[in-house]
Amino acid sequence: MKPDIVLAGVLAKKHTFTLPLNYQHPIAEQIKVFARELCSTENKDKKLPYLVFFQGGPGFAAMRPASNSGWIRRALKEFRVLLLDQRGTGLSTPVNYQSLKHLTPIEQAQYLSHFRADNIIRDAEAIRAQLCPADKWAILGQSFGGFCVLHYLSAAPKGVSEAYITGGIPSLTRSSDEVYQATYHRVLAKNHAFFQRFHDAQHLVTRLAKHLIDNEVYLATGERLTVEMLQLLGINLGMEQGPESVYYLLEQALINTPSGIEVNPLFLNHFCQLLDYNTNPIFALLHEAIYCQQSASQWAAHRVRQAFPAFNYQVGKPFLFTGEMIYPWMFDQFSHLRPLKAAAEILASKSDWPVLYHLEQLTQNRVPVAAAIYSEDMFVEMQYSLESAQQIGQLKYWLTSEYEHNGIRMDGERILDKLISLNRGELLR
């Protein structure tokens, strides 16, 4: 392997593939899809199978590794790792308001309709046909990456030798409304735990919310900071070390100045770093679509919220954070989403999304699958994951309360090692 980058204990090689935007019309518009191949220095001359990593999201690029550590270190003992920038992310023909500005809203929506798990897996199979056509490869999915893994097992299982999922077994049949009903209950529980743990957090955040109502406050990115935006910080309550990040930010939110109480510029800068809607628009545009199979989402999170009025903040009432929900007003308030508002409306009304999970195929699945299910997961409902696990052949799972949704970032080496042991019938370590 001739590397493009040498890291601590890792050789990295860049791959760029030219692939169809629409596989129904393969000689029409083309896009670039990027993947980074990793190999440990001690295995550089060995022929090892690939392990392909599918990132969470949708709409996020694969990690940029700095060293041989975490789950990558465990994987590199027996695999070459392929970190895939899913179409539209990272170095894979990025999607953003600038790249789409030459298209009409209808054309934007048509273009974006090709960026769900089905086409991500078509890309993966096209890449396998170029890198190792005679060989199967292993796959690993985190969060939305797990959704991609299950589509892979539905649509192209002959290309897969073994599969791993962390925090990403979706419901195979439930509607987006059902998903968000469960998610709001989880978010309520995370709010309760957060405000019980940090005793002055409710005071800090309600004081800040009142200041935002009484004053025009602008983020470092230029948008006015609203109470609804502030509530979005709750997406971090379901992450490892996320509650701590939110609390420490709230501690520094308001400062005394000679002209009175002001919002700390540090807060306004760091707030933008904790939310990804401006930088990763696919997440906002297609998040609800990942749950849609021959149905429209119709802004499911926004509609279902009406059954949970406690999330509609009023001065004098307790403040609640929201979670991983997308709302139509975000396309008015976030500057990089505004130019895509009309396309977002079209996508929310789209009812002919293809089926993602073929139940008969998954029931008969023969590819070994090992999954970590996190019992306190705020993003992927545990009961739905367990329900799906019973419908998938050859799937073994490890149910644990040790980790939050992004546990693989914090203790990935241990988690992947357990899943590999589980898949191969070894004693769990």
Image (cartoon, helix red, strand yellow):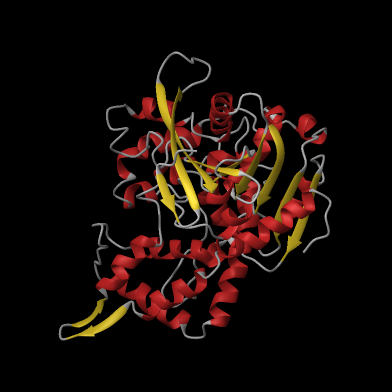
| Front residue (pair 71, 147) | 71
- Residue 124 is situated, as x and y percent measured from the top left of the image, at 56, 31
Residue at the spot x=64%, y=66% of the render?
403
Name the image quarter holding the C terminus. Answer: bottom right
Question: Horizontal placement of 428 versus 46: left or right?
Answer: right
Question: Horizontal placement of 176 versus 199: left or right?
Answer: right
Question: Horizontal placement of 364 versus 98: left or right?
Answer: right
Question: Quick check: can you spot residue 169?
Answer: no
Question: Quick check: can you spot residue 15?
Answer: yes
- Residue 400 is situated, as x and y percent measured from the top left of the image, at 73, 64
- Residue 180 is situated, as x and y percent measured from the top left of the image, at 60, 52
Residue at the spot x=34%, y=79% of the render?
252
Tell me if residue 191 comes above or below residue 363 in the rendering: below
- Residue 379 is situated, as x and y percent measured from the top left of the image, at 60, 56
Please tell me in which quadrant of the rendered image residue 212 appears: bottom left
| Front residue (pair 392, 16) | 16
Question: Horizontal placement of 276 versus 102: left or right?
Answer: right
Please tell me in which quadrant of the rendered image residue 276 appears: bottom left
Tell me if residue 32 comes above or below residue 71 in the rendering: above
